[in-house]
Amino acid sequence: MAQAKLWTKDFIVGIGLNLSMSMVFYLLMTSMAGYAVARFAAGEAAAGFASSAFVLGAVFARVLTGKYLDFIGRRRLLIITMAVSVLASLAYLAADSLTLLIGLRIVHGLAFGAGNTAIMTAIQSIIPASRRGEGTGYFGTATTLSTALGPYLGVIIPRESDFAMLFIASAVMSVAALVACILIRLPAQELSDYQRRTKWHLRLGTLVDRDGLRIGSVMLLAGTAYAAALVFLAGYAAEHGVAAAASLFFVAFALASLVARLFVGRLQDVFGDNAVIFPVFACDIAGNLLLALWPTMTGIVLAGVLIGFGFGSLMPCMQAITVKSVTMNRVPVATASFFLLLDAGSGIGPVILGFLYPLTGGNGMFLVCAGLVVAAVVVYIGVHGRRRGGRPGREYLG
């Protein structure tokens, strides 16, 4: 039987859209705290909030977007949110107070959270069900590229030019995302009777999805561990006299993730979830242990490879599981719930680990991160692996 077609025009445009959107996130997240200090002489806490306020807006947007996405229309919402992203990027140039900057960050985060939920949901209607893991993995390569290019440009552009050029670069990428939103064609979504009946019901069950939260709880733990590397690795590497290793870690992470996503999703479709998830977890644990126990140039770069194969593969694999665990009319809410917990781990986790850092030191903190990934394994077994993780080649209808 002929294999369902994956590489359509709309799938390719969707990858470009995801890349442009994710680049804006990582470009500004890396540099915004430094900008708040340089432009407004912000204290450490205020500068950190200027960066993380974006995540606050994104989390709030995801809660409502999951419910109302199909009422608004997926393509329409994408166009609206990317237009807002263009305007927000340019508005940073005119922000003349820290309060206004933080307000813009929240608005920009709202646009990103809604738009990202929309494209992450919409792409699943383009990917053939029989190639769900493979397609989600390929689609995620855009996010992987942005995790390397975004932070790199976020450092290089202000250093070689100025912050104004950084915001212009963000606007250009947002324009590219907007053009992709106009070009992409998405299948029409019929509203279910349940969606119509509960349109104005703002109960917890209509805003979040149980399966999305179950699978997302795994990413809450694993995402917290990875966020620790994003936030603390540069200082940790400098403490051990290998400051250059931090940037090489992220290059190694991105390359390993790209390689893994070329085949891990296909293996997941053929052999089942557990066959790939447990090796992926093992790589993630090993990478965090290397960071804790061998903080040398070689050890940190090798850790980047292992965590790239591990956490870099985990997100698309778990997203595919989330989609397969629910009926299609619940995909928007389930996707929003999944990324809600991933965002929480990325935004709140480093704050909690930051309190631990003075007590444990960097070595101890990365040991804690390895423990968090072990805890994620236990949660995965409980919520999915023990019951349905070994069934390949079928849809789970929840």
Image: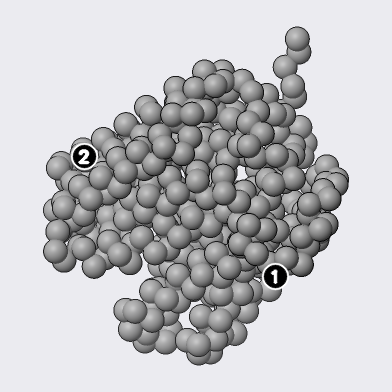
Point out residue 273 in the picture as x, y percentages from the top left corner: 50, 27
Viewport quadrant of the C terminus: top right
In depth, the one of 207 and 372 nearer the eye is: 207
- The image shows residue 145, relative to residue 174, as above or below, that is above
- Quarter of the image where one finds residue 300: top left
Q: Return the residue at label 2.
A: 290
- Residue at x 83%, y 42% (from the top left corner): 187
- Quarter of the image where one finds residue 381: top left
In depth, the one of 334 and 291 nearer the eye is: 334
Point out residue 309 in the picture as x, y percentages from the top left corner: 39, 33
- Helix, strand or loop for disc 2: helix
Q: CA distance from mark 1 to mark 2?
A: 42 Å
Query: Which residue appears farthest toward the top when viewing the image?
Result: 1
Q: Residue flagged by tag 1: what amino acid is it?
A: Val
Q: For label 2, count other residues whose C-alpha is less than 10 Å away and answer few (under 14), some (14-19) or many (20+).
A: many
- Helix, strand or loop for disc 1: helix
Work out whether residue 253 can be spotted: no
Q: How is the image coloured?
A: one colour
Point out residue 38 in the picture as x, y percentages from the top left corner: 39, 81
- The image shows residue 151, relative to residue 106, as above or below, that is above
- Determine whether, in the image, residue 355 is placed left or right of residue 175: left
- Determine whether, in the image, residue 215 is placed left or right of residue 174: left
- Determine whether, in the image, residue 127 is placed left or right of residue 144: right
Viewport quadrant of the N terminus: top right
- Residue at x 30%, y 64% (from the top left corner): 352
Q: Which label belongs to residue 287?
A: none
Q: Residue flagged by tag 2: what amino acid is it?
A: Leu
- The image shows residue 334, relative to residue 77, as above or below, that is above
In depth, the one of 183 and 63 nearer the eye is: 63
Q: Return the residue at label 1.
A: 84
- Residue at x 66%, y 34% (from the top left corner): 397
